[in-house]
Image (tube, grey):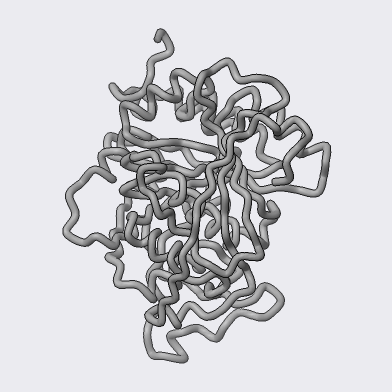
Amino acid sequence: MPSSPKSSNFRPSIYSYRSAASCLYLLIGISGFVFGLSALSLRGQTRDFKHRNPLSVSVRWDRSSTDAGIPDDDSKRRKVMGFVGVQTGFGSGSRRRALRQTWFPSDHQQLERLEESTGLVFRFVIGKTSDSSKMVELKKEVAEYDDFMLLDIEEKYSKLPYKTLAFFKAAYALYDADFYVKADDDIYLRPDRLSLLLAKERSHSQTYIGCMKKGPVFTDPKLKWYEPLSNLLGKEYFLHGYGPIYALSAEVVRSLAALRNGSFRMFSNEDVTIGSWMLAMNVNHEHVKELCAVECSASSIAVWDIPKCSGRLCNPETKMVELHGKDVCSKSPTLPSEED
């Protein structure tokens, strides 16, 4: 994201890169999307934060780089159990308001308390737009709530696979996490139960956690669907997680970050794209049905309307608040109470 005239207070944290080619992942193919990154803490917003340690971060991509983005010094990365990137957009302000009224605290101190109690860091993840008025509004929201990861990539539905890859690379560079979680802004999430899921002992270091499905493979959006793989190969479609929420272990995300820039095959669907990359790795697919619950229960982790409403809550702004009003959804010892 271009620096503003008021960004002189930004303190850069620049990561060096080393080349890491990997012949094991030739199935992924080649894409022209080139990465490199440096992270800038948002100390130069339109007004000063009231808090000592601003939480939001802006990540700039250096498209001239051909090296992978793996930090050389882990001591610069914050150690957490999980980093949760809630993917959002410029037309989703009402969803973010609903989330901040429910499971995603709007208060800076309560957000930090939630992170301390669960071991998970939560940030809204958004790209950029050429609409200057929208960027101004975003900057105001960042200054008010301080809960964003800003990516220097166009925020556009057709670019979601690129944004997702940018998110994982940026999250890995900034956080030394056991798991990196991609979540959408139109699901109801239980942070405490997600924490328990990620804290489980696992024998496989390369793990892909999600509500798994077998579905069609999409190619370039300008082309038609592939002929069903069952006709071509005599097999079912490959297994992959539903897009609203899934988690990748640190070793998996490290592999993504280690590949040379431009070596990723992008499909039109983000969840299918991630699933195809997982095929090229020795990952363990962990199916967790509680990540796609249709209603709150004692075990549900993420609630959304499946298969209705294209894999999200129907009327999320309203439904989110309704769900949070139910004790079975919102009551938990790890969630800050309203009285605190």
Report the front residue among 332 and 296: 332
Task: Give residue 314's position: percent from left, percent from top.
Answer: 57, 42
Residue sitting farthest toward the top:
339
Report the front residue among 222 and 127: 127
- Identify the image quadrant of residue 185: top right
Task: Give residue 16's position: percent from left, percent from top.
Answer: 50, 56
Residue 105 relative to residue 48: left or right: left
| Residue at image location 40% in from the left, 75% down from the top | 238
Residue 166 relative to residue 247: left or right: right
Residue 149 relative to residue 288: left or right: right
| Residue at image location 34% in from the left, 27% down from the top | 116
Tally of marks: 0
Report the front residue among 213 and 143: 143
Vertical placement of residue 221 versus 186, above or below: below
Identify the image quadrant of the C terminus.
top left
Task: Give residue 331's position: percent from left, percent from top.
Answer: 34, 23
Vertical placement of residue 64 versus 184, above or below: below
| Residue at image location 45% in from the left, 28% down from the top | 103
- Identify the image quadrant of residue 235: bottom left
Task: Give residue 68's position: percent from left, percent from top.
Answer: 49, 65
Report the front residue among 48 and 211: 48
Residue 243 relative to residue 74: left or right: right
- Identify the image quadrant of residue 34: bottom right
